[in-house]
Image: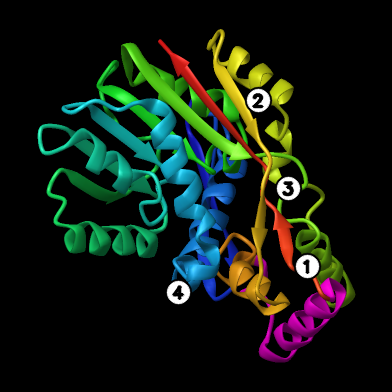
Amino acid sequence: MGLRKTVSRIRIGSQSLAIWRMRGERMEMTELEAAKAKAVAAYNAAADYFDHPVSSFWHRFGRRTVERLGLRVGDTVLDVCCGSGGSALPAAEAVGPQGTVVAVDLAERLVALGEAKARAKGLGNIAFEAGDMLALGYADARFDVVVCVFGIFFVPDMVAATKELWRMVRPNGRLAITTWGPKMFEPANSAFWGAIRDERPDLLKSFNPWERISTPERLREMLAEAGIAEPEIVAESGRHLLSSPDDWWLIAMGSGYRGTLAQLDAATLSRVRERNLALLGGCTAITTNVLYSVAVK
C-alpha cells in the first residue's frame, strides 16, 4: 500500500509550524507532532525567564531527583527533557570526569542555557543536545541511568515514551521519572486560567497533561503499562514562597504557561496579567507537590 502524505500548518505564537500527516503504511502522527511543536514554542519563548531566581524549583527538584539515584563515579547518564540542566548538571558533578551525561531537550534555547552553565562550571563530561527523546537512536542498554524530570507528561502516549526510555537502561540500571503531584501551582494556576477565560476562552485547556499521573497510583499504573514493575515512588508535599504576586507572573513567563501568553497581543497580555494578579490577591506561596519515581531494571 502506498504512502500518502499531506502537510498542514499550525500557528503557535509567532511561529508557523508544519505538521505532517502520514497515512497508509505509517500511523498518523499529527497529535504527537503537535504536542512537540507546542512544547518547543512554549519553552523557547520561556527561556528568557526560565532561570530567573523566582523559578528556583526547577533546579531544586532536579537536584533532589539526582540525589535519590545515588549516582556513582563513572556512570553514564541520559537526561531527557533536560531544560537548562536542573538535573543534568548535578548528575555531571556526581559521575565525575570518568562518567558522561547526555542532556537532551526539544527547546534549543534551553539547551543553550545549559551549555553555558556547563562551561561556567568547567564540566567537560556533559553534552547538551537539541533533540527528541523518542528518536535518539541509542542502542538498547546504553546507559546506566536515564532521567526525565517534568517532561514525560508532554508526550500524548506516555507509556510508549516510557518504554523507549526503559529500553536504553542497562540491566541493573535505573530510570528516574519525576512529575508534578496534585494541585500544581495552586492557587496561581486557577487564577491564571481564570484570567485567560475572561480574555481568550478559546485558549483554555480542558486539562493539564501532568494530571494524568499526578498521584502515586496513576504514576504506578502508567509505569506498569510500560512494563516496569515495583518502582519506588515517593510523594513530596511542598510550597514555593512568593515575595509578592509579581513573582508568580515571572514564573508563568518562564514556564509552559508562556506558550499561551505568546498567543496574546500586547494589550490582551497586559489585561491578563492585571487580572491574574488581582485574582491572586495577597498570595504568598504556591503548591509544588512532586512525585519521584525510581525503577531498577
Tag shown at residue 34: none
Q: Residue at x 67, y 67 (%)?
A: 260
- Residue 59 vs residue 46, the one in the foreground: 59
Residue indicated by mark 2? 219
Is 110 rendered above or below residue 131? Answer: below
Magenta residues (range): 260-281
Dot 3 crowding, Cα within 10 Å, few <14, some 14–19, many 20+: few
Mark closer to the chain start, 1 or 3: 1
- Give the label on residue 192, or none: 1
- Give the mark nearest the N terminus, 1 or 4: 4
Give the crowd class for mark 4: few <14, some 14-19, many >=20 residues within 10 Å.
Answer: some
Q: Secondary structure at mark 1?
A: helix
Q: Does the magenta stretch mainly form a helix, a strand or a loop?
A: helix
| Secondary-structure class at tag 3 | loop
Report the amino acid beneath label 3.
Asn
Q: Residue at x 22, y 56 (%)?
A: 118
Residue at the far bottom: name it: 267
Label 4 or label 3, whichever comes before in sequence order = 4
Mark in front: 3 vs 2: 2
* 150 inside magenta stretch: no
Residue under label 3, please give it: 208
